Image: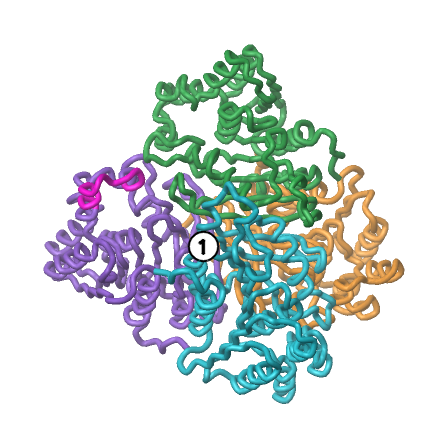
Chain colours: A orange, B cyan, C green, D purple
Amino acid sequence: MASLKVKFLATSIKMQMHLSVFLPEAAMRAPAGADGARLKVLWLLHGEGGDCSDWLRLSMVEHSAEAAGIALVMPNLDNAMYMDMAHGGYPYFTYLTQDLPLHIRYLVRVLSDRPEDNFVAGAGVGGYGAVKWMLRAPQAFGGCACFSGDVDIVAALRAREAEGGLGDDWAAAFGDADRIAGTDDDPMALARQLAAARTPVAPIRISCGEGEPGVARRRDAAAALRSLGLDVRFHEDREAQGWPLWDARVREFIRAAITPGVAAEG
Amino acid sequence: MASLKVKFLATSIKMQMHLSVFLPEAAMRAPAGADGARLKVLWLLHGEGGDCSDWLRLSMVEHSAEAAGIALVMPNLDNAMYMDMAHGGYPYFTYLTQDLPLHIRYLVRVLSDRPEDNFVAGAGVGGYGAVKWMLRAPQAFGGCACFSGDVDIVAALRAREAEGGLGDDWAAAFGDADRIAGTDDDPMALARQLAAARTPVAPIRISCGEGEPGVARRRDAAAALRSLGLDVRFHEDREAQGWPLWDARVREFIRAAITPGVAAEG
Amino acid sequence: MASLKVKFLATSIKMQMHLSVFLPEAAMRAPAGADGARLKVLWLLHGEGGDCSDWLRLSMVEHSAEAAGIALVMPNLDNAMYMDMAHGGYPYFTYLTQDLPLHIRYLVRVLSDRPEDNFVAGAGVGGYGAVKWMLRAPQAFGGCACFSGDVDIVAALRAREAEGGLGDDWAAAFGDADRIAGTDDDPMALARQLAAARTPVAPIRISCGEGEPGVARRRDAAAALRSLGLDVRFHEDREAQGWPLWDARVREFIRAAITPGVAAEG
Amino acid sequence: MASLKVKFLATSIKMQMHLSVFLPEAAMRAPAGADGARLKVLWLLHGEGGDCSDWLRLSMVEHSAEAAGIALVMPNLDNAMYMDMAHGGYPYFTYLTQDLPLHIRYLVRVLSDRPEDNFVAGAGVGGYGAVKWMLRAPQAFGGCACFSGDVDIVAALRAREAEGGLGDDWAAAFGDADRIAGTDDDPMALARQLAAARTPVAPIRISCGEGEPGVARRRDAAAALRSLGLDVRFHEDREAQGWPLWDARVREFIRAAITPGVAAEG
């Protein structure tokens, strides 16, 4: 295997941006490397208060990536909630979706850029980021997964507003619910547009724990997406939540969606 | 020597904050360690677009710190301009001046917390941060240095506003010049208050390159501080600017101000 | 939580040695810090071909350490097999057991040095290292655990010799089985001496997977240690092996042995 | 700019090997990236007791690399003295010269593999490594530089032996002087063979400080190489030694040899 910690000055956001990249042993074995020998990539997004080391530290996804022979790209998005921030002017989402893929694919030669080889998943607000990214660029991905995150971000924002306010960091990123509703930061609105235009959209997986706050909202969002005709698989776990759940689900995502034909690990 | 890369979830700012710490060989040699065996500390602040690795990578300060037997603490402040940000609600300066010293001194045992053992310096906007920090807490430092930064931040903001606007990142941090003038984010105002109250203030070093933009403003700020009775040493370099200048000046600061009695390095 | 990546020039081995330290949120919460507020420590040793990032990346031990409020210290021992190497003269084990605890406890203030607060565990050859360390210094630890490693290293070396030779790296570290048998690099010999001297020894946990090579040898070693009167708990897993097993066992070790009174995580 | 910290399990040496890579801003600017857009590379080798972070931390080479638009690849070779070790069986030099270039060029797409674009330099024993590498593979490099290192390693080993022995680490790497003399670990022998075969060899730069131990030996080695017809530039500095010298010389090497036509940095 190979592990890369990358830092670069991103032109969109004018900051040193960090990311972690995991490459399986398979990436090292073909150094004669015809350009055809590209790896499938899972873009993995952290949640609130996390960073680009979360997925490697807090789950066992590295084992699954090694067994499946796929690359993991784990960017650092600070607490920007996968937004071009409402206040402060930092275009984090533009960095994520434009600068990052362009540069990392240019620098790291083995990453495939074919849509069917690219997948995106995230936990918490990273799950919102993952679904939003795929719905903004449906031609670029083979699937996405949202673990304990809100695809219906507007409902989540309204719930927070009703419970006493967004808090500084959510307000800095989103402004407020009304500012987001119906825009391309609202995945439900994006889904409605794609459905209306009959644009093909790859499968969406939504997972959450039965006991976590917001479970009803996530169940509703899955149903609403399905009623639009999207391919949505919803999993509600009776036992696990938090990282034990996300660990299990990201590994299931790799096994079942990204490399369905590859033999199981261990 | 020892090098530490520290990350912790800062309660003030609710983000994973990073810093680098350099400890000289002297820090390793006294493991029996009476509490008296504490190291002098230079807090080193990066400039705009930089991060906590800048000073180690872009200057040769590590050699001087090793020779002088002092610790370096280099925090990451993103592009927050050493402000509790005007927009977005991220209290970076509170993190820097409250969370960070408390926690790093608690975790890393060898750092002295005596005022005469603590010094702060920075380059560019980090120089503004360094002087502001010392003027806010004059009882906590033995001296500070500002390299190519603006102690008169209000004048710097007005100059930017006159030249076409602050830009997103400066606006996010400062708001505008009027919002800062006369507050405790304005080092000139802090200096006037300290002078009026006859509070003792440790020496301030200000350095800049003759050819750099803003040199006149920095010259004026030094003169204004001096006219208030502060101990200000102003150095205007005829040849160097940027990192070659900052490298030379930080090493002079260590040699002349922090450890004046220690033999010169190799 | 806090994460530290530490590098220092170790005098015993004259190399830059790396380690990772995990500190739970509890370590940050008591910055007023009476000396009494020290953390329990689990020293976690990697296996062959691994490094100081293995335990954080490849298991979910960080969650358990956070929940239990304990520190993890994870040193890098290269491929030295927890030996002062037979060839090459690199005293890795001396570094591990002398330089490292001395310096890291001096630098990082919150680590307890009381025997009942210190535990050591390792996977593969790191399990050998863990048991050897505790049996060499029985007064320094509250318990140890060996996951899929050989406490009877002499038997393991003889098995390798019989199967076609030790290979370069094992030979560099150990020389050969005869060179180790009966010395203080032979945990079985150490155990016999401790038993003969009636020295108190803290509990030893040995775990392995039913299907892994060497399981019979590990079963025998556990029985032999027990027959000497040591407190040995042997776990042979019918399903898991490798990291899934080690992940489960290290978490059980923390829960059951290190912090038996602390409420379970999540 | 971009900074990469890479770790991979090297098959030759069966250990996790670390390296640092610096890429100039120019590497990021051409993401459309025809395969022709490759960067010149300077392979930079650390000295005894150092690691892959030395050159970035202890010199200001990053500024020169950015100004010149070249990449820096800085591997970690532990204390193996750029040898396939005499004892312990670790093939570090094979890793450096075979695994590393193959894999890093495969992974990081922007590094040129054309001989005229590749240069190697090192300080101390890294200078020995640099010259040895180029003389073993004269068709692969456009030039090399040795800073305060011994091209005549046999003379250096004999001097150490006469002064009381090699010490554990030198003995582990080299065995003894007789074991090296005349082999392909002896750069003087390699140079004689290349001269006899009239193989073209790129220029060699040798620098040392007038006051450093071994200066006479280094002067003699330069003269001997020159008498074989090699293009050797010898610089003996009257003032600087150690890192201030190596910093100045590596920057001169980049400016004068690697990118002679590129405008000087700021």
Is most of the magenta stretch helix, strand or loop? helix
Q: Is residue C107 visible?
A: yes
Q: Tell me if residue C206 is in the magenta stretch.
A: no
Q: Quadrant of residue B118?
A: bottom right
Q: Is residue A143 visible?
A: no
- Left or right of C264? Residue A90 is left
Q: At x 78% / y 44%, what residue is drawn?
A: A209
In the depicted view, which residue is nearer to us: C2 or C176? C2
Span highlighted in magenta in the image: D157-170
In the depicted view, which residue is nearer to us: A229 or A23? A23
Q: Position of residue D39 (x, y in %)?
A: 39, 66
Q: Is residue A29 above or below residue C216?
A: below
- Left or right of B247? Residue A41 is right
In the depicted view, which residue is nearer to us: C173 or A189? C173
Residue that numbered label 1 is attached to: D107
Q: Position of residue D66 (x, y in %)?
A: 42, 69
Q: Amino acid at mark 1?
A: Leu
How many numbered discs? 1
Q: Position of residue A103 (x, y in %)?
A: 53, 64
Q: Quadrant of residue A67?
A: top right
The residue lying furthest to the bottom in this view is B162
- Left or right of A264? Residue B193 is right
Estimate how packed mark 1 is, as few (under 14), some (14 to 19) or many (20 or more) residues with alpha carbons within 10 Å.
many
Q: Quadrant of the C terminus of chain C?
A: top right
User: Tag 1's secondary structure?
Assistant: helix
Q: Tell me if residue D167 is in the magenta stretch.
A: yes
Q: Position of residue B47 (x, y in %)?
A: 55, 70
Q: Is residue D265 above or below residue C30?
A: below
The chain containing the residue under callout 1 comes to D
